[in-house]
Image (tube, coloured by chain):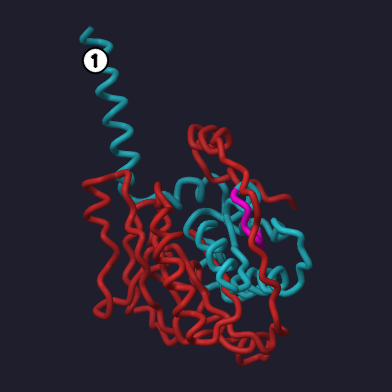
């Protein structure tokens, strides 16, 4: 996403990223970032919670219009996630492990078998 | 409050990301917003990997299943009159169920239309975009697809972009 923002900005478009991992805005050099401490897949909040979604969006628009620079500009959204941490640290994961996670587990299992076989 | 970028990650991924070596960029592009928000046309760009069912094909998740180190770098168009029943999800790295209920959690089109009606922003663009965020290699984004999306946005008179990675 940081690569997209940097390219758009270089093409003459002003950008702001609403980012669950705002550290990447600094490390990759994105022009403007609003950090939200929300679980993955829920960048703008909870489904059906229009008020929270609007507050996130308004905060991002303030960063877009109100930052004089210099980049990288990183601002934190002040509200915590309204859900339970222990529930949501699990709930955001895909129902099936992603292909790369499945592959990594298969590789670890192969290494284990080789160690035990050797 | 200070946002913890690693809060939702399992411990192993937390360590992996925190220790990842990233070359510091030589420069950071900077385009100040050239007009007040109330006059600006804004587009939304998400990385939720969604498409409009029956209008454009889904992202190529089947190839990612076969090649786990590859992610579809292309983009799909999302119109400002997007309806929930048109939204097709499939991102393999998140739980898509809440985006299936309310796409605004990932791409807040309805909220932007409300802000347009309230005069907070000038307008929401006619066309918004979805990419798919799992990109082990972003070279095709920077060389091809992001410049193409930027050109399409500028053709529609877009001034600014709000990006919502998931």
| Residue A29: x %, y % from top left | 63, 53
In this picture, residue B88 sits left or right of residue B23:
left
* B164 is higher (above) or lower (below) than B35: above
| Residue A39: x %, y % from top left | 53, 54
Q: Residue at x 27, y 80 (%)?
A: B55
Q: Residue at x 55, y 82 (%)?
A: B158
Picture colour for chain B: red
For the residue labelled by badge 1, is the local secondary structure a helix, a strand or a loop?
helix
Picture colour for chain A: cyan
| Residue A48: x %, y % from top left | 51, 73
Q: Which chain is disc 1 placed on?
A: A
Magenta region: A28-34
Q: Residue at x 42, y 60 (%)?
A: B143
Pick the residue in front: A56 or B35.
Answer: B35
In this picture, residue B78 sits left or right of residue B18:
left
In the figure, residue A52 lies in which quadrant?
A: bottom right
* A61 is higher (above) or lower (below) than B158: above
Residue to which mark 1 is pinned = A114
Q: Residue furthest right?
A: A68
Is residue B102 in sight in this rendering? no
Is B49 magenta? The answer is: no
- Within-10-Å neighbours for mark 1: few <14, some 14–19, many 20+: few
Is residue B77 in sight in this rendering? yes
Pick the residue in front: A14 or B78.
Answer: A14
In the figure, residue A12 lies in which quadrant?
A: bottom right
């Amino acid at each position: 996403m940081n690569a997209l923002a940097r390219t758009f900005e270089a093409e003459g478009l002003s950008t702001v990223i609403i980012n669950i991992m705002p550290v990447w805005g600094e490390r990759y050099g994105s022009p403007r970032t609003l950090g939200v401490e929300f679980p993955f897949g829920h960048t703008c909040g909870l489904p059906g919670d229009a008020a929270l979604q609007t507050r996130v969006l308004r905060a991002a628009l303030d960063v877009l219009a109100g930052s004089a620079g210099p980049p990288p500009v990183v601002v934190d959204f002040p509200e915590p996630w309204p859900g339970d941490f222990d529930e949501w640290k699990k709930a955001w994961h895909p129902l099936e492990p992603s292909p790369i996670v499945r592959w990594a587990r298969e590789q670890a299992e192969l290494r284990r078998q080789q160690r035990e076989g050797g | 409050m200070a946002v913890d970028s690693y809060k939702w990650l399992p411990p192993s991924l937390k360590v992996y990301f925190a220790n990842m070596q990233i070359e510091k960029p030589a420069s950071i592009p900077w385009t100040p917003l050239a007009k007040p928000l109330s006059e600006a046309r804004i587009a939304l760009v998400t990385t939720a990997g969604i498409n409009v069912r029956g209008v454009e094909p889904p992202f190529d998740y089947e190839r990612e299943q076969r090649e786990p180190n590859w992610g579809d770098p292309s983009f799909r168009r999302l119109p400002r009159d997007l309806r929930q029943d048109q939204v097709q999800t499939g991102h393999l790295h998140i739980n898509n169920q809440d985006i299936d209920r309310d796409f605004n959690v990932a791409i807040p089109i309805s909220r932007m239309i409300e802000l347009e009606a309230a005069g907070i922003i000038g307008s929401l663009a006619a066309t918004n975009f979805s990419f798919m965020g799992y990109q082990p290699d972003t070279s095709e984004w920077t060389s091809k697809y992001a410049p193409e999306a930027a050109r399409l946005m500028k053709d529609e008179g877009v001034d600014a972009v709000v990006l919502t990675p998931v």
